[in-house]
Amino acid sequence: MTLPRIGITIGDQGGIGPEIVLKVLESPQLPEGDYVLFGSLSFITREAERRRLTAALQRCRIADVASAPGLPAARKPTAESGRASFAALQRGVEAARQGELEALVTAPISKHSWHMAGISWAGHTDYLEHLFPGAIMAFFSERLNVALYTHHLPLAQALSKIRIKPLEDFLLRLHAYARPLGGQDLQLMLSGLNPHAGEGGMLGNEETEVILPALESARRRGVPVSGPYPPDIVCRKALDRPNCLVVSLYHDQGLVAFKLIAFETGVNVTLGLPFIRTSPDHGTAFDIAGHDQADPGSMLAAVRLAHRFAVPPT
């Protein structure tokens, strides 16, 4: 049996990324694979020794990122840690693009650190969308799955993007990307925008004038999508239905429910790439970095999901 090749980036060096990555690599629940850790060799080695997690280094290879020096853990955003985390991400993505990896798991980065370093992307997904136009941000857990029509945008800007043709195109792409992961019985559940999904036009016209026409057009083209559902119940209707994927129109519409249910075990998945990419659904947690308090559950779930998606069913 050929082991799946899975890359892992350590994220922002001042956050909890290094801690949770090393804890995951030592976990007995880590599936068997060929793991490659992207980051500064000197920093990773020092962190493993300081945290007494050196056994983790026996379960992976380290791809030393020369442009990511072994910085001290600042426990706050810095330009230096921003450059380091971005360099590690670039190296990991390039390895995946070259066919050296089946999957890439990314530990949390700091958008503030990237901004301080002059990096224009607003996070992992924005960078990946630049390289692979049409990529989609989605979130998977044991109880609820969510995909985002828009994500890291101001709310007013996100709402301005809800138009018939772009939404129809999104539903078509989402179905094509998610079906290999969700199976033949995948069902998309599209959220409305307004309270009660507009209440027949009494609380807004977007459902009847934009969302429903896009949904019906996509359905005629073979997409198994239903809705639009009232935003306050759509996640409840999809709960504990692993074949269902909620389509949220903007970031918080779906992620408030998702993170309430699966904050410790949820996984961020970028759909539409030529490789698998997953990440924990939380951030850098600078406030607890360096105190050995970080829960590696979401990072472990991200690695396990990447492993499952990377290994075709027998």
Image: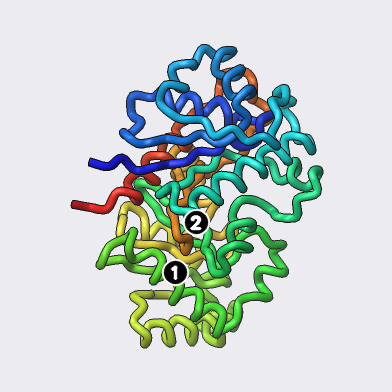
Location of mark 1 (residue): 174
Residue 14 found in image quarter: top right
Q: CA distance from mark 2 to mark 1?
A: 11 Å
For the N terminus, the image quarter is top left
Q: Give how far across and how far down residue 295 sits, in percent.
A: 50, 28
The residue shown at (33%, 29%) is: 29
Residue, far left = 314
Tell me if residue 282 comes above or below residue 270 in the rendering. above
- Report helix, strand or loop for mark 2: strand
Tell me if residue 247 comes above or below residue 268 in the rendering. below
**Figure coloring:** rainbow
In front here: 24 or 226?
24
Q: Which mark is residue 110?
A: none
Q: Earlier in the sequence, mark 2 or mark 1?
A: 1
Q: Which mark is residue 270?
A: 2
In front here: 112 or 56?
56
Please give left or right for residue 110 compared with residue 274 in the image: right
In front here: 60 or 107?
60
The residue shown at (50%, 55%) is: 97
In front here: 75 or 154?
75
